[in-house]
């Protein structure tokens, strides 16, 4: 496919190291670790970007319903066209901020990081709703010569209509660092600390599922007392009183991680893509 220009093309291309082909996937990055850290607390869809020509493929069917279209998008520009015009500048700044953060960390480690932020997108009834965007980079192809991203969009207007304009870069698969950039006061960018520790973040999916302290303790093979202590600390730090308000608050702060996408088709997709197999 001929390379299609779009809003973010020049920005992405100004960081050639971010899409260099020499980086390889660590052998211990498994399918489950992609699935376990993708957010889907609401209606969602996903697709894969080929950075080589900005085409997209493996688009989930939910996109048609959420955006009220009968045509699958084929390029990044098609997706950008759904973004609220007033949020375009923020999206550009969020992409730039996450690229700068990854440059500091080292683009070669990008496979171990997830980036995310929120913005409004046009929906089927022509109104704009808040969506949570997250991206996981990886490579594919028999020789791992193409750089691809898995992008996931989740409608979160039922949880929050407030965008705090925070961009997040967080590690997984053994990486414990979390980086947040407050972009609410452009052009000033302020790095802020995550409210929760890496261990506390691990409890969020279980709390979000409404599991009791006993059930969480059994799953994590720890004591109920330890679970209660973590739960109490999480509620205190987020200034919330129950699971419902906690989920909303963590969504606003882009901290709701490790929730599962329960979608057999997505699991099958990842299992079938060659980048997850040894060449």
Image: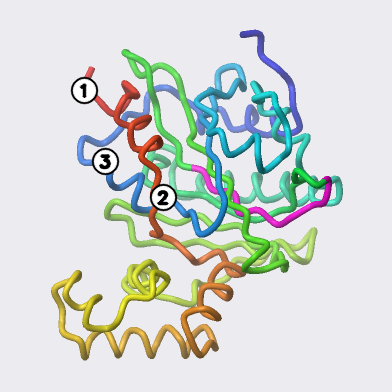
Closer to the observer: label 2 or label 3?
2
Tag shown at residue 260? none
Calculate the distance from the C-alpha at mark 2 to the C-alpha at mark 3.
18 Å
Whichever of callouts 2 and 1 sits on the residue coming sooner in the sequence is: 2
**Image quadrant for the N terminus?**
top right
Identify the residue shown where x is 72% and y is 28%. 78
Identify the residue shown where x is 38% and y is 69%. 209
Name the chief secondary structure element in magenta: strand
Whichever of callouts 1 and 3 sits on the residue coming sooner in the sequence is: 3
User: Residue 94 vs residue 220: left or right?
Assistant: right
Magenta residues, start to end = 126-135
Calculate the distance from the C-alpha at mark 2 to the C-alpha at mark 1.
25 Å
User: Residue 275 vs residue 2: left or right?
Assistant: left
Looking at the picture, tell me which residue is in the foreground, 45 or 70: 70
Q: Secondary structure at mark 2?
A: loop
Tag shown at residue 29? 3
Identify the residue shown where x is 48% and y is 86%. 242
Q: State the residue position of label 2.
A: 261
Q: State the residue position of label 1.
A: 278
- Where's residue 249, x and y in %? 57, 76
């Amino acid at each position: 496919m001929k390379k299609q220009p779009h809003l973010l093309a020049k920005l992405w291309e100004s960081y050639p190291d971010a899409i260099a082909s020499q980086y390889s996937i660590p052998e211990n990055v498994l399918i489950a670790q992609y699935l376990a850290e993708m957010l889907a607390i609401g209606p969602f869809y996903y697709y894969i970007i080929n950075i080589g020509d900005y085409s997209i493929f493996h688009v989930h069917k939910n996109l048609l319903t959420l955006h009220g279209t009968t045509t699958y998008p084929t390029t990044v520009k098609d997706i950008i066209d759904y973004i609220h015009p007033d949020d375009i500048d923020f999206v550009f700044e969020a992409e730039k901020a996450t690229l700068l953060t990854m440059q500091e960390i080292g683009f070669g480690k990008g496979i171990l990081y997830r980036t995310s932020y929120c913005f409004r997108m046009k929906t089927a009834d022509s109104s704009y709703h808040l969506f949570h965007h997250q991206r996981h980079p990886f490579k594919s192809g028999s020789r791992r010569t193409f750089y691809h991203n898995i992008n996931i969009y989740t409608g979160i207007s039922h949880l929050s209509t407030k965008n705090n304009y925070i961009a997040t870069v967080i590690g997984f698969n053994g990486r414990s660092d979390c980086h947040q950039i407050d972009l609410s006061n452009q052009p000033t960018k302020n790095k802020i600390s995550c409210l929760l520790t890496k261990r506390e973040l691990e409890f969020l999916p279980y709390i979000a599922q409404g599991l009791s302290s006993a059930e969480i303790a059994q799953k994590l093979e720890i004591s109920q007392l330890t679970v209660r202590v973590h739960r109490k600390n999480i509620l205190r730090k987020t200034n919330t009183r129950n699971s419902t308000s906690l989920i909303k608050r963590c969504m606003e702060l882009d901290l709701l991680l490790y929730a599962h996408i329960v979608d057999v088709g997505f699991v099958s997709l990842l299992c079938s893509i060659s980048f997850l197999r040894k060449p």
